[in-house]
Image (tube, rainbow, N blue to C red):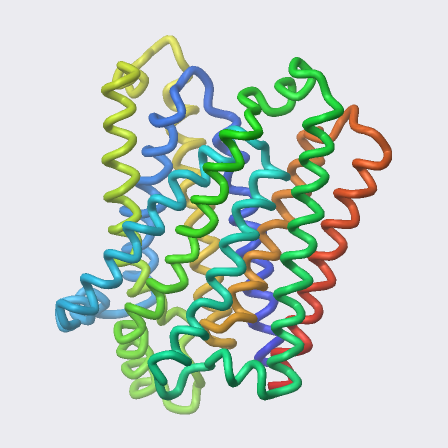
Amino acid sequence: MIVIYGVLFHLVGGFASGSFYMPFSQVKGWHWESYWIIGGLFSWLIVPPLAAWITIPGFTDIIARTDTGTLCWTYFMGVLWGIGGLTYGLGVRYLGMSLGNSVILGFCSAFGALVPSIYYDVLNVPGKETFSDLLASTGGRLVLLGVLVCLTGIFISGRAGMMKENELPDDQKQASVKEFALTKGLIVAVISGILSACFSFGLEAGSDMAMEANRRWVETNPGQGEFLFRNNVTYVVLLWGGLTTNFIWCMILNTRNKSFGDYVNNKTPLLRNYLFSALAGTTWFLQFFFYGMGESKMGNTASSWILHMAFIILVANMWGIVLKEWKGVSKKTKITITIGIATIIASVFLVGIGNSMK
Protein backbone atom coordinates (compact mmCIF):
# COMPACT_ATOMS: atom_id res chain seq x y z
CA MET A 1 0.00 0.00 0.00
CA ILE A 2 2.88 2.38 0.79
CA VAL A 3 4.35 1.80 -2.68
CA ILE A 4 0.95 2.39 -4.31
CA TYR A 5 0.59 5.72 -2.50
CA GLY A 6 4.13 6.67 -3.51
CA VAL A 7 3.48 5.89 -7.18
CA LEU A 8 0.21 7.86 -7.13
CA PHE A 9 1.91 10.92 -5.64
CA HIS A 10 4.62 10.69 -8.30
CA LEU A 11 1.94 10.41 -10.98
CA VAL A 12 0.26 13.62 -9.83
CA GLY A 13 3.63 15.37 -9.57
CA GLY A 14 4.59 14.21 -13.04
CA PHE A 15 1.33 15.53 -14.46
CA ALA A 16 1.95 18.93 -12.84
CA SER A 17 5.50 19.13 -14.20
CA GLY A 18 4.59 17.92 -17.66
CA SER A 19 1.79 20.49 -17.83
CA PHE A 20 3.43 23.58 -16.32
CA TYR A 21 4.70 24.91 -19.65
CA MET A 22 1.15 25.09 -21.04
CA PRO A 23 0.15 28.34 -19.23
CA PHE A 24 3.31 30.00 -20.59
CA SER A 25 2.00 29.36 -24.10
CA GLN A 26 -0.87 31.74 -23.29
CA VAL A 27 1.45 34.66 -22.50
CA LYS A 28 1.37 37.19 -25.34
CA GLY A 29 3.80 39.93 -26.31
CA TRP A 30 6.46 39.28 -23.67
CA HIS A 31 10.04 38.15 -24.13
CA TRP A 32 10.92 34.72 -22.79
CA GLU A 33 12.98 36.09 -19.87
CA SER A 34 10.09 38.26 -18.69
CA TYR A 35 7.47 35.57 -18.32
CA TRP A 36 10.06 33.03 -17.13
CA ILE A 37 11.14 35.10 -14.12
CA ILE A 38 7.56 36.08 -13.17
CA GLY A 39 6.66 32.40 -13.14
CA GLY A 40 9.90 31.68 -11.30
CA LEU A 41 9.12 34.12 -8.51
CA PHE A 42 6.03 32.04 -7.76
CA SER A 43 7.88 28.74 -8.23
CA TRP A 44 10.91 29.51 -6.08
CA LEU A 45 10.10 32.42 -3.77
CA ILE A 46 6.37 32.80 -3.07
CA VAL A 47 4.71 29.37 -3.16
CA PRO A 48 7.39 27.19 -1.41
CA PRO A 49 7.38 29.07 1.92
CA LEU A 50 3.59 29.33 1.72
CA ALA A 51 3.36 25.54 1.32
CA ALA A 52 5.81 25.07 4.19
CA TRP A 53 3.86 27.49 6.41
CA ILE A 54 0.62 25.60 5.75
CA THR A 55 2.05 22.11 6.31
CA ILE A 56 4.94 22.48 8.79
CA PRO A 57 4.40 24.51 11.98
CA GLY A 58 7.60 26.35 12.89
CA PHE A 59 9.41 25.63 9.61
CA THR A 60 11.42 28.86 9.96
CA ASP A 61 12.73 27.64 13.32
CA ILE A 62 13.92 24.40 11.70
CA ILE A 63 15.84 26.38 9.06
CA ALA A 64 17.31 28.71 11.69
CA ARG A 65 18.55 25.76 13.78
CA THR A 66 20.13 23.94 10.83
CA ASP A 67 23.93 24.09 10.65
CA THR A 68 25.50 26.41 8.11
CA GLY A 69 27.19 23.61 6.16
CA THR A 70 23.87 21.88 5.44
CA LEU A 71 22.24 25.14 4.38
CA CYS A 72 25.15 26.05 2.09
CA TRP A 73 25.28 22.66 0.36
CA THR A 74 21.51 22.62 -0.10
CA TYR A 75 21.60 26.14 -1.52
CA PHE A 76 24.56 25.31 -3.80
CA MET A 77 22.79 22.26 -5.22
CA GLY A 78 19.85 24.57 -5.85
CA VAL A 79 22.11 26.97 -7.78
CA LEU A 80 23.33 24.14 -10.03
CA TRP A 81 19.82 22.81 -10.42
CA GLY A 82 18.70 26.36 -11.25
CA ILE A 83 21.05 26.36 -14.24
CA GLY A 84 19.45 23.07 -15.29
CA GLY A 85 15.98 24.53 -14.87
CA LEU A 86 16.95 27.65 -16.81
CA THR A 87 18.31 25.65 -19.72
CA TYR A 88 15.25 23.36 -19.50
CA GLY A 89 13.10 26.26 -20.58
CA LEU A 90 15.46 26.94 -23.48
CA GLY A 91 15.55 23.25 -24.44
CA VAL A 92 11.77 23.04 -24.70
CA ARG A 93 11.79 26.36 -26.53
CA TYR A 94 14.14 25.01 -29.22
CA LEU A 95 13.02 21.36 -29.41
CA GLY A 96 9.35 21.36 -28.43
CA MET A 97 7.55 19.58 -25.59
CA SER A 98 8.02 16.01 -26.82
CA LEU A 99 11.65 15.89 -27.92
CA GLY A 100 12.90 18.52 -25.46
CA ASN A 101 11.49 16.78 -22.42
CA SER A 102 12.60 13.33 -23.60
CA VAL A 103 16.25 14.36 -24.01
CA ILE A 104 16.45 16.60 -20.94
CA LEU A 105 14.68 14.27 -18.56
CA GLY A 106 16.51 11.26 -19.92
CA PHE A 107 19.83 12.58 -18.69
CA CYS A 108 18.18 13.89 -15.53
CA SER A 109 16.67 10.45 -14.87
CA ALA A 110 19.98 8.61 -15.21
CA PHE A 111 22.04 11.00 -13.11
CA GLY A 112 19.38 11.64 -10.48
CA ALA A 113 18.54 7.96 -10.06
CA LEU A 114 21.99 6.39 -10.04
CA VAL A 115 24.58 8.95 -8.88
CA PRO A 116 23.27 9.20 -5.26
CA SER A 117 23.38 5.42 -4.80
CA ILE A 118 26.93 5.31 -6.21
CA TYR A 119 27.87 8.21 -3.93
CA TYR A 120 26.53 6.35 -0.90
CA ASP A 121 28.55 3.33 -1.94
CA VAL A 122 31.81 5.26 -2.22
CA LEU A 123 31.40 7.04 1.13
CA ASN A 124 29.72 4.09 2.84
CA VAL A 125 26.82 6.22 4.13
CA PRO A 126 24.76 4.23 6.66
CA GLY A 127 21.01 3.86 6.22
CA LYS A 128 21.06 4.79 2.53
CA GLU A 129 20.35 2.56 -0.47
CA THR A 130 23.67 2.02 -2.24
CA PHE A 131 24.39 0.80 -5.74
CA SER A 132 25.71 -2.42 -4.21
CA ASP A 133 22.38 -2.89 -2.43
CA LEU A 134 20.57 -2.57 -5.73
CA LEU A 135 22.82 -5.16 -7.36
CA ALA A 136 22.50 -7.55 -4.44
CA SER A 137 18.71 -7.95 -4.46
CA THR A 138 16.20 -9.15 -7.04
CA GLY A 139 14.06 -6.07 -6.53
CA GLY A 140 17.09 -3.79 -6.83
CA ARG A 141 18.18 -5.42 -10.07
CA LEU A 142 14.66 -5.01 -11.41
CA VAL A 143 14.81 -1.30 -10.54
CA LEU A 144 18.11 -0.99 -12.43
CA LEU A 145 16.56 -2.81 -15.37
CA GLY A 146 13.68 -0.33 -15.24
CA VAL A 147 16.16 2.56 -15.34
CA LEU A 148 17.84 0.99 -18.39
CA VAL A 149 14.49 0.43 -20.10
CA CYS A 150 13.49 4.02 -19.38
CA LEU A 151 16.70 5.33 -20.94
CA THR A 152 16.06 3.08 -23.94
CA GLY A 153 12.59 4.57 -24.31
CA ILE A 154 14.04 8.06 -24.11
CA PHE A 155 16.62 7.19 -26.77
CA ILE A 156 13.84 5.92 -29.03
CA SER A 157 11.86 9.13 -28.43
CA GLY A 158 14.94 11.17 -29.29
CA ARG A 159 15.39 9.11 -32.44
CA ALA A 160 11.81 9.95 -33.42
CA GLY A 161 12.67 13.63 -32.98
CA MET A 162 15.63 13.25 -35.33
CA MET A 163 13.38 11.59 -37.89
CA LYS A 164 10.93 14.46 -37.56
CA GLU A 165 13.79 16.92 -38.13
CA ASN A 166 14.71 15.20 -41.39
CA GLU A 167 11.14 14.89 -42.68
CA LEU A 168 9.51 18.27 -42.15
CA PRO A 169 10.38 21.50 -43.97
CA ASP A 170 11.46 24.41 -41.79
CA ASP A 171 8.17 26.30 -42.10
CA GLN A 172 6.15 23.28 -40.94
CA LYS A 173 8.50 22.51 -38.01
CA GLN A 174 8.28 26.08 -36.83
CA ALA A 175 4.50 26.05 -37.12
CA SER A 176 4.41 23.74 -34.09
CA VAL A 177 7.70 24.84 -32.43
CA LYS A 178 8.29 28.48 -33.39
CA GLU A 179 12.03 28.54 -32.64
CA PHE A 180 12.92 24.96 -33.58
CA ALA A 181 16.73 24.53 -33.65
CA LEU A 182 17.90 20.93 -33.34
CA THR A 183 21.66 21.32 -32.77
CA LYS A 184 21.40 24.24 -30.34
CA GLY A 185 18.47 22.57 -28.62
CA LEU A 186 20.28 19.26 -28.11
CA ILE A 187 23.35 20.97 -26.59
CA VAL A 188 21.19 22.93 -24.18
CA ALA A 189 19.09 19.84 -23.38
CA VAL A 190 22.11 17.72 -22.44
CA ILE A 191 23.44 20.42 -20.09
CA SER A 192 19.98 20.87 -18.59
CA GLY A 193 19.45 17.17 -18.03
CA ILE A 194 22.73 16.67 -16.18
CA LEU A 195 22.40 19.74 -13.94
CA SER A 196 18.69 19.21 -13.26
CA ALA A 197 19.62 16.03 -11.40
CA CYS A 198 21.16 18.27 -8.73
CA PHE A 199 17.66 18.67 -7.30
CA SER A 200 17.86 15.06 -6.13
CA PHE A 201 21.29 15.76 -4.61
CA GLY A 202 19.91 18.90 -2.95
CA LEU A 203 17.20 16.89 -1.22
CA GLU A 204 19.89 14.66 0.22
CA ALA A 205 22.03 17.63 1.25
CA GLY A 206 19.08 19.15 3.11
CA SER A 207 17.67 15.90 4.49
CA ASP A 208 18.50 16.95 8.08
CA MET A 209 15.80 19.62 7.85
CA ALA A 210 13.27 17.12 6.53
CA MET A 211 14.18 14.63 9.25
CA GLU A 212 13.74 17.30 11.93
CA ALA A 213 10.29 18.13 10.54
CA ASN A 214 9.50 14.42 10.56
CA ARG A 215 10.73 14.04 14.16
CA ARG A 216 8.52 16.86 15.38
CA TRP A 217 5.54 15.36 13.54
CA VAL A 218 6.07 11.90 15.02
CA GLU A 219 6.37 13.35 18.53
CA THR A 220 3.09 15.23 18.30
CA ASN A 221 1.23 12.64 16.19
CA PRO A 222 2.21 9.21 17.57
CA GLY A 223 1.17 6.25 15.48
CA GLN A 224 0.47 8.34 12.36
CA GLY A 225 3.50 7.12 10.39
CA GLU A 226 5.98 9.17 8.37
CA PHE A 227 5.30 12.86 7.76
CA LEU A 228 4.06 13.35 4.18
CA PHE A 229 5.10 17.01 3.95
CA ARG A 230 8.53 16.87 5.57
CA ASN A 231 10.39 17.90 2.37
CA ASN A 232 8.57 21.22 2.14
CA VAL A 233 11.05 22.82 4.55
CA THR A 234 14.01 21.64 2.45
CA TYR A 235 12.43 23.08 -0.69
CA VAL A 236 12.52 26.59 0.76
CA VAL A 237 16.33 26.62 0.94
CA LEU A 238 16.91 24.52 -2.17
CA LEU A 239 14.74 26.75 -4.33
CA TRP A 240 16.50 29.89 -3.13
CA GLY A 241 19.45 28.57 -5.12
CA GLY A 242 17.28 28.08 -8.20
CA LEU A 243 15.90 31.59 -7.83
CA THR A 244 19.40 33.08 -7.65
CA THR A 245 20.56 31.55 -10.93
CA ASN A 246 17.40 32.30 -12.87
CA PHE A 247 16.95 35.83 -11.53
CA ILE A 248 20.50 36.86 -12.46
CA TRP A 249 20.22 35.45 -15.98
CA CYS A 250 16.77 36.88 -16.65
CA MET A 251 17.90 40.33 -15.50
CA ILE A 252 20.88 40.06 -17.86
CA LEU A 253 18.53 39.18 -20.72
CA ASN A 254 16.11 41.96 -19.76
CA THR A 255 19.04 44.39 -19.98
CA ARG A 256 20.49 42.95 -23.19
CA ASN A 257 17.13 42.74 -24.98
CA LYS A 258 15.80 45.97 -23.45
CA SER A 259 12.74 44.03 -22.35
CA PHE A 260 12.14 45.55 -18.89
CA GLY A 261 9.25 47.37 -20.50
CA ASP A 262 7.37 44.07 -20.85
CA TYR A 263 6.27 44.25 -17.23
CA VAL A 264 4.31 47.50 -17.78
CA ASN A 265 3.58 47.35 -21.51
CA ASN A 266 -0.10 48.24 -21.84
CA LYS A 267 -0.07 47.08 -25.46
CA THR A 268 0.07 43.51 -24.15
CA PRO A 269 -2.61 41.79 -22.02
CA LEU A 270 -0.78 42.56 -18.77
CA LEU A 271 -3.20 41.03 -16.29
CA ARG A 272 -3.54 37.89 -18.41
CA ASN A 273 0.23 37.58 -18.78
CA TYR A 274 0.83 37.93 -15.05
CA LEU A 275 -1.94 35.46 -14.21
CA PHE A 276 -0.75 32.78 -16.64
CA SER A 277 2.89 33.23 -15.60
CA ALA A 278 1.86 32.89 -11.96
CA LEU A 279 -0.22 29.81 -12.80
CA ALA A 280 2.73 28.24 -14.62
CA GLY A 281 5.02 28.88 -11.66
CA THR A 282 2.55 27.51 -9.13
CA THR A 283 1.87 24.44 -11.25
CA TRP A 284 5.60 23.89 -11.59
CA PHE A 285 6.10 23.88 -7.80
CA LEU A 286 3.27 21.40 -7.35
CA GLN A 287 5.38 18.74 -9.10
CA PHE A 288 7.82 18.76 -6.19
CA PHE A 289 5.11 19.23 -3.59
CA PHE A 290 3.70 15.87 -4.65
CA TYR A 291 7.15 14.41 -5.32
CA GLY A 292 7.99 15.14 -1.69
CA MET A 293 4.89 13.26 -0.59
CA GLY A 294 5.87 10.29 -2.75
CA GLU A 295 9.46 10.44 -1.50
CA SER A 296 8.23 10.28 2.10
CA LYS A 297 6.68 6.90 1.25
CA MET A 298 9.43 5.49 -0.97
CA GLY A 299 12.59 7.38 0.01
CA ASN A 300 14.82 9.46 -2.28
CA THR A 301 15.92 6.34 -4.14
CA ALA A 302 16.60 5.42 -7.76
CA SER A 303 13.06 4.10 -8.10
CA SER A 304 11.49 7.26 -6.65
CA TRP A 305 13.40 9.60 -8.96
CA ILE A 306 12.93 7.53 -12.11
CA LEU A 307 9.17 7.25 -11.52
CA HIS A 308 8.92 11.01 -11.19
CA MET A 309 10.92 11.62 -14.37
CA ALA A 310 9.08 8.95 -16.37
CA PHE A 311 5.67 10.41 -15.55
CA ILE A 312 6.87 13.88 -16.57
CA ILE A 313 8.10 12.54 -19.90
CA LEU A 314 4.79 10.78 -20.55
CA VAL A 315 2.70 13.86 -19.80
CA ALA A 316 5.01 16.12 -21.82
CA ASN A 317 4.73 13.82 -24.83
CA MET A 318 0.96 13.80 -24.40
CA TRP A 319 0.93 17.59 -24.59
CA GLY A 320 3.27 17.44 -27.58
CA ILE A 321 0.70 15.34 -29.38
CA VAL A 322 -2.15 17.67 -28.35
CA LEU A 323 -0.15 20.65 -29.67
CA LYS A 324 0.30 18.78 -32.98
CA GLU A 325 4.09 18.77 -32.79
CA TRP A 326 4.05 15.48 -34.74
CA LYS A 327 1.55 16.54 -37.38
CA GLY A 328 2.70 15.82 -40.91
CA VAL A 329 5.40 13.26 -40.09
CA SER A 330 5.51 9.81 -41.64
CA LYS A 331 3.78 6.75 -40.23
CA LYS A 332 7.20 5.29 -39.36
CA THR A 333 8.07 8.33 -37.24
CA LYS A 334 4.71 8.21 -35.45
CA ILE A 335 5.25 4.52 -34.72
CA THR A 336 8.74 5.30 -33.41
CA ILE A 337 7.53 7.93 -30.93
CA THR A 338 4.71 5.61 -29.86
CA ILE A 339 7.20 2.82 -29.18
CA GLY A 340 9.33 5.25 -27.20
CA ILE A 341 6.40 6.27 -24.99
CA ALA A 342 5.31 2.64 -24.54
CA THR A 343 8.85 1.70 -23.50
CA ILE A 344 8.86 4.43 -20.87
CA ILE A 345 5.52 3.16 -19.55
CA ALA A 346 7.02 -0.34 -19.31
CA SER A 347 9.93 1.06 -17.30
CA VAL A 348 7.51 2.57 -14.78
CA PHE A 349 5.95 -0.85 -14.17
CA LEU A 350 9.39 -2.47 -13.80
CA VAL A 351 10.55 0.13 -11.28
CA GLY A 352 7.30 -0.11 -9.32
CA ILE A 353 7.45 -3.92 -9.15
CA GLY A 354 11.13 -3.87 -8.23
CA ASN A 355 10.58 -1.35 -5.47
CA SER A 356 7.73 -3.42 -4.00
CA MET A 357 10.04 -6.46 -3.81
CA LYS A 358 12.77 -4.71 -1.82
Which quadrant is the N terminus positioned in?
A: bottom right
Residue at 27% of width from left, 22% of height from top? 254
Which one is in front, 39 or 302?
Answer: 302
Q: Is residue 206 visible?
A: yes
Which residue is at the far top? 267
- From the top left corner, tell me how far across and down residue 88 is, in percent: 45, 40
Query: For this view, does 268 lie left or right of residue 342?
Result: left
Left or right of 18, for residue 53? left
User: Can the viewer see residue 46 in this picture?
Assistant: no
| Point 35% across, 51% down: residue | 81
Does residue 339 sit above or below 357 in this rendering? above
**Which part of the image, by quadrant, shows the C terminus?**
bottom right
Which residue is located at x 36 percent, y 88 percent?
Answer: 126
Q: Quadrant of residue 310?
A: bottom right
Instruction: Looking at this view, name the residue that lies furthest to the right.
Output: 331
Q: In the rendered picture of this protein, how many numbered marks are placed on residues?
A: 0
Q: Quadrant of residue 320?
A: top right
The vertical placement of 23 against 47, above or below, is above
Q: Quadrant of residue 58?
A: bottom left
Front position in the image: 201 or 13: 201
Toward the viewer: 322 or 341?
Answer: 341
Give how far across and how far down residue 175 sits, in percent: 64, 18
In the image, is residue 324 above or below residue 17? Answer: above
Please state the horizontal and vertical placement of residue 246, each as a whole percent of the image: 30, 39
